[in-house]
Image: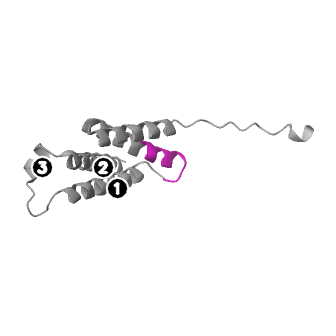
């Protein structure tokens, strides 16, 4: 017993990020698949920020902004690919597409829009350091 008297019990603190990742994932899936675009954008923003927070907290990233920008770029590319599969690039009217998107195009635009917001926030954070 005397050999172990100097050993301090390790205390692990709980991270709040897994709850927010799960909530962001559920909201983004709900919004994208059902077509509730504001919920989809909010869920993707929560998911992206939570994943970047986990990476920062676990010290896989030095700051929050670079992973946030990378996730935003991934969402922009994924949303753009979804939109590109549904429209003919030669005959597309951008104003009409944004005014009344069909189901799949609207979903792709919401994913790309949320990714654009993540990139904008990350660039603002990088510049303001």
Q: Earlier in the sequence, mark 1 or mark 3?
A: 1
Which residue is pictured at 34% across the width and 49% down the height? Answer: 122
Q: Main secondary structure of the magenta part?
A: helix
> Viewer-proximal residue, 73 or 24?
24
Q: Is residue 56 left or right of residue 108?
A: right
10 Å neighbourhood of mark 1: few (<14), some, or many (≥20)?
some
Q: Would you say residue 59 sits in the magenta stretch?
A: yes
Which residue is pictured at 26% across the width and 58% down the height? Answer: 81
CA gap between label 2 and label 1 equals 7 Å
Q: Are marks 2 and 1 in contact (CB under 8 Å)?
A: yes
The magenta region covers 50-61
**Which residue is identified by label 1?**
74
Color scheme of the displayed model: one colour
**Residue 35, percent across and down?**
26, 39
Q: Are marks 1 and 3 in contact (CB under 8 Å)?
A: no
Which residue is pictured at 21% across the width and 45% down the height? Answer: 103
Q: Is residue 12 left or right of residue 107?
A: right
Q: Nearer the viewer, mark 2 or mark 3?
A: 3
CA gap between label 2 and label 3 equals 19 Å
- Dot 2: element: helix
> Viewer-proximal residue, 30 or 115?
30
Which residue is pictured at 30% across the width and 49% down the height? Answer: 115
**Which residue is identified by label 3?**
97
**Which residue is identified by label 2?**
115
10 Å neighbourhood of mark 2: few (<14), some, or many (≥20)?
many
**Residue 80, percent across and down?**
25, 56
């Amino acid at each position: 017993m005397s050999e172990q008297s100097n050993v301090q019990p390790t205390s692990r603190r709980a991270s709040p990020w897994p709850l927010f990742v799960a909530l962001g994932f559920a909201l983004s899936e709900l919004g994208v698949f059902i077509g509730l675009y504001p919920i989809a954008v909010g869920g993707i923003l929560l998911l992206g920020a939570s994943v970047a927070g986990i990476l920062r907290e676990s010290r896989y990233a030095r700051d929050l902004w670079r992973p946030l920008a990378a996730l935003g770029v991934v969402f922009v590319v994924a949303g753009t690919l979804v939109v590109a599969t549904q429209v003919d690039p030669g005959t597309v009217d951008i104003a009409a597409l944004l005014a009344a998107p069909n189901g799949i195009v609207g979903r792709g635009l919401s994913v790309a829009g949320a990714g654009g917001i993540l990139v904008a926030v990350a660039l603002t954070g990088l510049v303001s350091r």
